[in-house]
Amino acid sequence: MKTRAFIICACALIFLLCACGEPEPEMSPYRKVNDLSGVAMSVKKGTAKPAGAEVSLANANEKDCISGEFFAVERKYGDGWAIIDTLPAGDIAWRDIAYIIPGGGLLEMPIDWNYLYGELKPGRYRIVKEFYYTSGDGQPDRYYLTAEFKI
């Protein structure tokens, strides 16, 4: 009788441990964002779809700034942002292309994340892009800008 009670309790404990849910996601490494004065990124209204979106990059500064192809998409998790797992398609490579956003100018670009993440489920997300801006010392400084959107 004690063995039967022990087995029932052990099974119940295993069930409860398995039913606790998914593990905590890995949180975003991008802590310092949107601190490039005069430059803003936004997702164009009505373009956010499960497979991609179109972003607008606006530069109100006098000098040009540069961005590349790299981007990351993160999902809102509690008070922070969590990394989304990429599809198991192998190594990820980015073309080394410079997109110049001229001083006082605007650049719009499509972002297709379907090949990287698959179609996103409904939720709150943000795109992270890397930017370079040359300040007074002549050396480009790296910044990260984000744009939030919902699916």
Image (cartoon, rainbow, N blue to C red):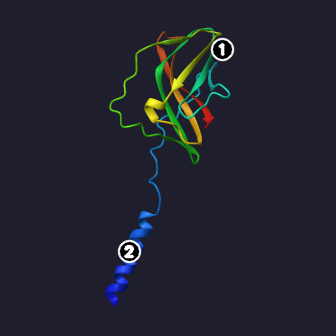
Query: Measured along the vertical axis of the image, is residue 56 above or below residue 48?
Result: above
Q: Secondary structure at mark 1?
A: loop
For the C terminus, the image quarter is: top right
Q: Is residue 111 visible?
A: yes
> Is residue 10 found left or right of 117 in the rendered image?
left
Quadrant location of residue 147? top right
- Mark 1: few, some, or many residues within 10 Å (few <14, many ≥20)? some
The disc labelled 2 sits on which kind of residue?
Cys
Residue that numbered label 2 is attached to: 11
Residue that numbered label 1 is attached to: 60
- The answer to which of 2 and 151 lies nearer the viewer is 151
Q: Secondary structure at mark 2?
A: helix
- The answer to which of 144 and 141 lies nearer the viewer is 144
Labelled pair 2, 1 in contact (Cβ < 8 Å): no
- The answer to which of 82 and 2 lies nearer the viewer is 2
- The answer to which of 13 and 139 lies nearer the viewer is 13
Q: Position of residue 25 (x, y in %)?
A: 46, 47
Q: Earlier in the sequence, mark 2 or mark 1?
A: 2
Q: Position of residue 8 (x, y in %)?
A: 38, 80
Please, which residue is most extreme toward the right here? 45
Q: Nearer the viewer, mark 2 or mark 1?
A: 2
Query: Measured along the vertical axis of the image, is residue 14 above or below residue 148?
Result: below
Q: Position of residue 24 (x, y in %)?
A: 46, 51
Q: Tell how many labels.
A: 2
Q: Residue at x 43, y 40 (%)?
A: 85
Q: Position of residue 28 (x, y in %)?
A: 48, 39
Quadrant location of residue 50? top right
For the N terminus, the image quarter is: bottom left
- Mark 2: few, some, or many residues within 10 Å (few <14, many ≥20)? few
Q: Is residue 135 visible?
A: no
Query: Measured along the vertical axis of the image, is residue 33 above or below residue 7?
Result: above
Marks 2 and 1 sit apart, C-alpha to C-alpha, by 63 Å
